Image (cartoon, grey):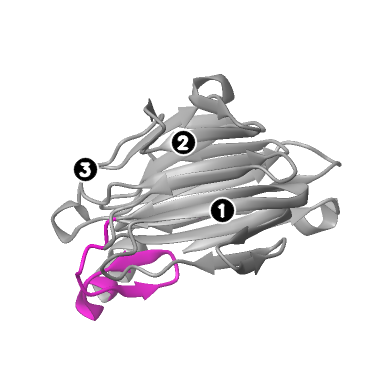
């Protein structure tokens, strides 16, 4: 699940996201513009700044808040929900703030790729995850520049364009649109090309878990019983 947020109206973001729980998955928050303060029930806190990432493993449970640390200006970024395999859903919560300068970059042919997770062109990203093998690239393409990325055919993958426009093969993908890539045999990579205004886009791919998904609000589990348990545990104060 991807939430793309973006506004320059403080009235849209000033309320932030006060204390709320999560269980059973990971949130990956990537800021493009604006500053967001994170605090959680494990005592962690951090400030998300433009170009930075917060990688949080909710595991068995965390209660956290995500609040803007600005009164005006633009707030823009992404929050990706990355599933955990059944065996890890009740693991200890964990989180890491990744500063903008700690995200490796690859440059070539009019393209800058910020490598948040996985690897591209021989550059290993800031994060590696064993079960879901996520690839998370922020691609900045000059006008007409092309970029190719091999992908395992069975991986799920999408491209979300947030500036300009690009094409994937013969398919045009305009701004604020997501292209969901096929993951059938023989689909072993992607080649994209920016339009005349250039483009910025995120490319996200990962290993499907092949497990049932039961999702309710901020909980992502495998069965409805596990969702009821998460709600009961939250009400009993056991997620803090
Ligand atoms: Co949250």
- Look at the numbered disc 1 and give the secondary structure of its residue: strand
Mark 1, Cα crowd under 10 Å, few <14 / some 14-19 / many 20+, is: many
Where residue 4 sits in the image (x, y, percent)? Answer: 62, 58
The residues bearing labels 1 and 3 have C-alpha atoms spaced at a distance of 27 Å
Question: Residue lying farthest bottom?
Answer: 224
Which residues are drawn in magenta? 207-227
Mark 2, Cα crowd under 10 Å, few <14 / some 14-19 / many 20+, is: many
- Look at the numbered disc 3 and give the secondary structure of its residue: loop
Question: Residue lying farthest top?
Answer: 101
Residue at 55% over, 38% down: 38
The mark lying in front, picked from 1 and 3, is 1
Residue at 69% over, 35% down: 35
- Look at the numbered disc 2 and give the secondary structure of its residue: strand
Where residue 229 sits in the image (x, y, percent)? Answer: 24, 70
The answer to whether mark 2 is within 8 Å of ligand 1 is: no
Q: Which mark is residue 192?
A: 1
Whether residue 16 is visible to the viewer of this picture, yes or no, is no
Q: Which mark is residue 116?
A: 2
| Residue at numbered disc 3 | 130
Disc nearer the start of the sequence (1/3)? 3
The residues bearing labels 2 and 1 have C-alpha atoms spaced at a distance of 19 Å
- Give residue 232's quadrant in the image: bottom left
Residue at 65% over, 39% down: 140
């Amino acid at each position: 699940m991807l939430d793309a947020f973006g506004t320059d109206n403080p009235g849209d973001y000033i309320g932030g996201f006060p204390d709320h729980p999560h269980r059973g998955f990971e949130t990956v928050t990537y800021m493009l513009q604006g500053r967001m303060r994170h605090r959680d029930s494990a005592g962690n806190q951090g400030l998300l700044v433009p170009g930075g990432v917060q990688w949080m493993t909710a595991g068995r449970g965390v209660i956290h808040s995500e609040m803007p640390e600005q009164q005006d200006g633009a707030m823009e970024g992404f929050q990706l929900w990355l599933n955990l395999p059944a065996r890890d859903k009740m693991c200890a919560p964990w989180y890491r703030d990744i500063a903008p300068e700690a995200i490796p970059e690859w440059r070539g042919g009019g393209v800058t790729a910020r490598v948040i997770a996985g690897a591209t062109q021989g550059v290993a990203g800031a994060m590696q995850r064993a079960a879901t093998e996520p690839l998370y690239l922020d691609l900045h393409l000059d006008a007409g520049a092309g970029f190719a990325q091999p992908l395992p055919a069975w991986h799920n993958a999408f491209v979300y364009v947030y500036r300009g426009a690009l094409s994937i093969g013969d398919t045009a993908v305009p701004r604020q649109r997501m292209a969901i890539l096929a993951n059938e045999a023989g689909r072993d990579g992607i080649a994209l090309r920016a339009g005349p205004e250039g483009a910025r886009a995120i490319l996200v791919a990962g290993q499907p878990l092949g497990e049932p998904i039961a999702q309710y609000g901020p909980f992502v589990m495998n069965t409805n019983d596990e969702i009821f348990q998460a709600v009961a545990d939250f009400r009993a104060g056991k997620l803090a």
